[in-house]
Image: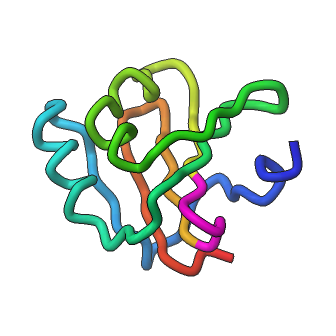
Amino acid sequence: MELLAKAPNTLGPDALTHENSDRDTTRKWLRELPVTASEVTLVWNQETALNLPWSTFVSYWSDFCYPSSDDVAIFIGTHCDLLLWHHYEVFEFKTGAF
C-alpha cells in the first residue's frame, strides 16, 4: 500500500505526543487535536486499511488501536497531517507531516 510507505516510524521531537493512560483521557486528547478534516485513513499493514469519519475514530479509537500488538498510521484528510499509534500505547501527531 502506497500510503504505508509514506509513514515514518516516528514523527520526531516536534510532534505532539500522548501516552495512553485511559480511554477517556485519550479520547479528550484526540478531540483537542487541530483536526479539521472529516475523514481519516487508518493503515495497519500492506493489506489492511480503513477509511472512516474522524469523529468515529475519536469516539472508538481503542477499537482500532491495540496495545502490545499493531502500530497504526492514521492519515488525516488530504494526508498532510499524520497521527501514529505505537503498540507501546503512545500517539504522535504532526500537522504538515508531508
Magenta portion: prevailing SS class: loop
Q: Does the magenta stretch include residue 78?
A: yes
Q: Does the magenta stretch include residue 89?
A: no
Q: How many marks?
A: 0
Give the image quarter of residue 32: bottom left
Dividing the image into 4 quarters, which one contains the C terminus? bottom right
| Residue 77, horizontal then vertical, whole percent | 57, 64
Residue range in magenta is 75-80
| Residue 47, horizontal then vertical, whole percent | 82, 25
Residue at 39 percent across and 39 percent down: it is 57
Residue at 71 percent across and 56 percent down: it is 7
Q: Identify whether 15 is placed above or below 59.
A: below
Give the image quarter of residue 49: top right
Q: Identify whether 77 is placed above or below 41.
A: below
Q: Identify whether 6 is placed above or below 62.
A: below
The colour scheme is: rainbow
33 left or right, relative to 72: left
| Residue 15, horizontal then vertical, whole percent | 43, 71
Of residue 44 and residue 89, the one placed in the foreground of this image is: 44
Q: Identify whether 80 is placed above or below 26.
A: below
Residue at 61 percent across and 40 percent down: it is 51
Residue at 79 percent across and 52 percent down: it is 3
Dividing the image into 4 quarters, which one contains the N terminus? top right
Q: Looking at this rendering, what residue extends furthest in the right direction?
A: 2
61 left or right, relative to 37: left
| Residue 45, horizontal then vertical, whole percent | 75, 31
